[in-house]
Amino acid sequence: MTLLLAALRHLLILTCCLAGLARADSLASVRGGGAPPLPGAAPIDALLTIAGQPVAIAGDQAWTLVDGKTWSASPWTADAPLLATAGGGDAAFALRGGARVDQLRLRQGGLVATSLAPLPLALRNARVATLGASVFVAGRDAQGQARLYEMKAPDATMPWQERPAWTGVGEPSALVGQTGALFLALDNGHWLRWSADKGWAERGTLPGALTPGALRAIGQAHLLMLSTAPGAATQLMTFHTITGSWATLPAPTIAGARLGTSWGDGLLWLPPGQGQAFVGAEVEAGKQLLKWLDWVVIVVYLVAMLGMGAYFYLREKRNSTSDFFVGGRSIPFWAAGISLYAANTSSISYIAIPAKAFESNWQYMTNNLVAVVGLMFVAVWIVPLLRRLDLMSVFHYLEIRFHPVIRMLASALCIAVQIGSRMSVVLFLPALAIATITGLDVVWSILIMGGFTIVYTAMGGMKAVVWTDFVQLFVKMGGAIFAIGFIVYQLNGGFGEFMQVAAAESKTKLFDFSFDLTKATVWGFIFLVLFDVVLTFPKDQVLMQRVLSTKSDKEAGRSIWAFAAIMIPGGFVFYGIGTALFVYYKANPERMNPLLPIDATFPLFIAAELPMGITGLIIAGIFAAAMATLSSIMNSVATLASVDFYEKLARNPTPKNSVRFAEVMTVVAGLLGIATALLLSRFDIHSLFDVSIELAGLLGGGFAGAYTLGMFTRRANSGGVAIGVASSIVLTSIAWSMKLVHPYFYLAISIMLCIVIGYLASLLFPAPTRSLKGLTIYKDV
């Protein structure tokens, strides 16, 4: 062990040295540009952007920049002075006079103003900004009292609502919204942040005076601005809203600026003097291309996975459905437990969990801790019940307890959700993240992950899935742990600096015992775990298939305990990556790319900071996380298709033919998943990811309720359960169409509706007359 630790330490030292040699000052580059001078001699009163087009207001004319080359004039009613503007979306907002706010839109090439309701009080030195669908105005009233007003969904009939204002001296000089918060610059150099849940907080001191209008949000967590420190030249700078760090971009020398506005991925500003051409600068995201050694590491990993599939293909006789679907029920409990964790930790978790911890803290880790308690219940009560039935398809239970039609319908919906919702997203999201950073095409990433997984899953069956999961867990966890060690070693203060910064920023906060269910509280996680773990685990073919592959009832229970034991340290590793990234980028803000989404933070670090070879190893870890989940889904879908449909509908099915059918269905499921992932690449990933979550809740919750009725009640019958399942799907779909709750609650709502309606409906039918021995959690009488 001592030699191993020493070797790891020397590897970290060598890696850090190599990374240091390759590091550039700034990861983002800046492309210059501009626009011709404004025709006419009238001085420019305001510069703003509407629907991506810069608009200059000069006297009684509004000039719109067309195609970035020429200015087009339209009339403008200058009946009140322009005090402040905010724009960038489809509409802009202008503060005209002390209490008048206009909404500005481009209509047929001209600027159209619509007056909103007047502010409750006239304000001086007021500034306006947008945040989400709301518009905010900050300023001081006639008595010098600070005021902050908000109008939600701006409309002429909407009233202004007053929000808590900041304290202290200083007049507003700029206001902007980003990352769910407002940022206010005061003329005395103070820099403040406000959010609805946390109120006002100091965020440090401005590096210099800000050019009017030249402060904008960019990406998901950056602000871009022109700043002029006393006695220094104007600089193009960024502020990272999560780490609170400032960085200077490598822009050409800027000879001052009078007014500015957003322009593409940058800023457009007006230099001092009359008749000057506009100057612009746009931020560009570079690609961190994979090196030859990275490809060698990735190829070695992929070939190793194929080798394991070929090994089990040649070793097994392939004539037994038990061997192909449940590994001959010979999988050791510890291997099944590791496989459970590997299948449950997809590449989405590998990327999204560090991003969540980077953005917030460890409160979502509470879900892992509470889930362990839920898994204890599953291990003691649910797993022994299903394991004794000697199942291959978990939906076989619904046939035994209720009716064959319920089994087949549940199985068909499960297959549709796994392929259309889960598999496609698991393939596409990591492919998109890797492509964004490394330049590896999304299509090739999807084909590599999907194609290799199809081959080794179809060849090796359940044994190949479990044992490749075992290897893949070490690949992805090894890469994750190395990343944490690398970051800590790179810090000037080492582990001490890591702990000090994390503690000062409350990045390791774990528990929130408040009763605000809009936040990540302990009570919210208890509620979610009850429905997402305890009540849905029995219908999860992907997870239950591993439990059913163990040697005995006792071993099956132990596999759940092993899963639970890995979940806690595994969670701390992935949340620890997010905290380490926060500390690193707080000290090195110039190494961030302002254009990338927050979820790309870890992939960015992998590609930009690690030397070749190590980058390939951790990208192989991302592939491993995706492929572990993909192989599980493919094998589970093939099992359901063969056991629930082929063996019931085919004439004289034999075990050998059933296995062959499952092999074909593995390939079909994989190809359908790849096709769906490629289809996703043509649409907005954020909305489609939400749809996948909603689809799982709308279609999956009802059958989880059916399991609950079957296992926890004696009175439920097939007629009542059928009514409960159908009613839950219909009613939850109505709630979805009316957007009554957050999408994450659809699963819980669907389960509760099925339980309540299904039980009440069962009272309308005769009670089950056949023996329920071994089908409920109650002791047999």
Image: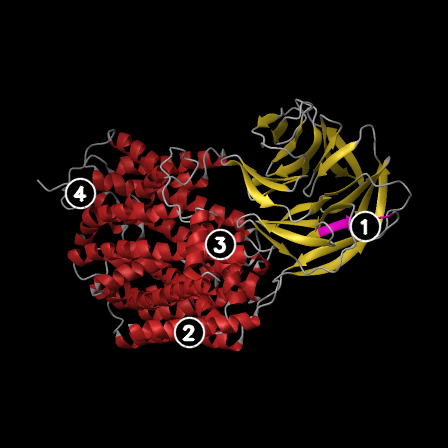
Give the magenta part as a residue range: 267-273
Name the residue carrying label 2. Answer: 11
Instruction: Choose mark 3 or mark 4, whichever is in front.
Output: 3
Name the residue carrying label 4. Answer: 777
Please state which amino acid type lies under the numbered disc 1. Answer: Pro
Please state which amino acid type lies under the numbered disc 3. Answer: Phe
* Residues packed near mark 2 inside 10 Å, few (<14), some (14 to 19) or many (20 plus): some
Q: Are marks 1 and 4 in contact (CB under 8 Å)?
A: no
- Measured as percent of width and height from the top left, residue 33 is found at 77, 57
Instruction: Choose mark 4 or mark 2, whichever is in front.
Output: 2
In the rendered image, the residue lying farthest to the front is 231
Secondary structure, mark 3, is helix
Q: How far apart are marks 1 and 4 (CA)?
A: 77 Å
Name the residue carrying label 3. Answer: 582
Q: How far apart are marks 1 and 3 (CA)?
A: 36 Å
Vertical relation: 371 (above or below) 758: below
- Measured as percent of width and height from the top left, residue 722 is found at 31, 38
Name the residue carrying label 1. Answer: 271
Q: Are marks 3 and 4 in contact (CB under 8 Å)?
A: no
Q: Is residue 45 left or right of residue 342?
A: right
Rendered image quadrant of residue 42 = top right
Q: How far apart are marks 3 and 4 (CA)?
A: 47 Å
* Residues packed near mark 3 inside 10 Å, few (<14), some (14 to 19) or many (20 plus): many
* Residues packed near mark 4 inside 10 Å, few (<14), some (14 to 19) or many (20 plus): some
Please state which amino acid type lies under the numbered disc 2. Answer: Leu
Q: Which mark is residue 399?
A: none
Q: How far apart are marks 1 and 2 (CA)?
A: 51 Å
Magenta highlight on residue 677: no
